[in-house]
Image (cartoon, rainbow, N blue to C red):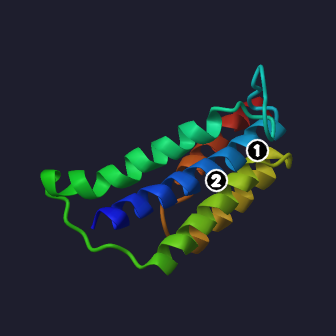
Amino acid sequence: MHIHRWRAMLWLFLLGAILGTVLDAFHVYSYVEQYTRPAFLGVAWWVPLLFGFATVAIGYSHPLIDPLIHNFRRPRRLAISIAELAWLLLAYMIAASPISSLAKTVLLSLIYFNTGSHLCMPVLHLQLETWEDL
């Protein structure tokens, strides 16, 4: 039992460390943020640790906290979760790209209405706020 728990925590850590660092590198690449002492991909050495531990804390705490707040739901299939994550990553990459704000908003709107879900709404909302800069 404990070996499965540690294996899940290791996978969560690796997923968070790798994806979080790569997505944070998009921020560095698009000049949204800059680290004073970058070590790898323009990010600081502690960024993979931060994203890895945050992913473990969030991912591991949900199954423990949900019963306490009476939030009972069936787990989704892995393929569905991966597909939703792919749409979210695509929306993030579009938002971080150097194309115009109008083109970003159109593409994010297409993704939002195509998926029929709420995945892209935070990214779309942030993009719409930047229209004041046009």
Residue 78 position within the rendered picture, expressed as x and y whole percent measured from the top left: 46, 77
Q: Residue at x 78, y 22 (%)?
A: 37
- SS at badge 1: helix
Q: Earlier in the sequence, mark 1 or mark 2?
A: 2
Q: Amino acid at mark 2?
A: Leu
Q: Residue at x 38, y 75 (%)?
A: 76
Residue 120 position within the rendered picture, expressed as x and y whole percent measured from the top left: 57, 57
Nearest the eye: 25 or 133: 25
Nearest the eye: 113 or 62: 62
Which label number is shown at residue 19?
A: 2
Which label number is shown at residue 61?
A: none
- Left or right: where does residue 50 sit relative to residue 107? left
Residue 64 position within the rendered picture, expressed as x and y whole percent measured from the top left: 23, 54
Nearest the eye: 134 or 3: 3
Residue 50 vs 18, above or below: the answer is above
- Left or right: where does residue 79 sit relative to residue 72? right
Residue 73 position within the rendered picture, expressed as x and y whole percent measured from the top left: 24, 69
Q: Amino acid at mark 1?
A: Phe
- Mark 1, residue position: 26
Do callouts 1 and 2 mark residues in contact (Cβ within 8 Å)? Answer: no
Q: Residue at x 48, y 71 (%)?
A: 81
Mark 1 crowdedness (10 Å alpha carbons): few <14, some 14-19, many ≥20: many
- Left or right: where does residue 133 sit relative to residue 86? right
Q: Residue at x 35, y 65 (%)?
A: 3
Work out how far the residue at label 1 is from the one at label 2, CA to CA, in angstroms: 11 Å
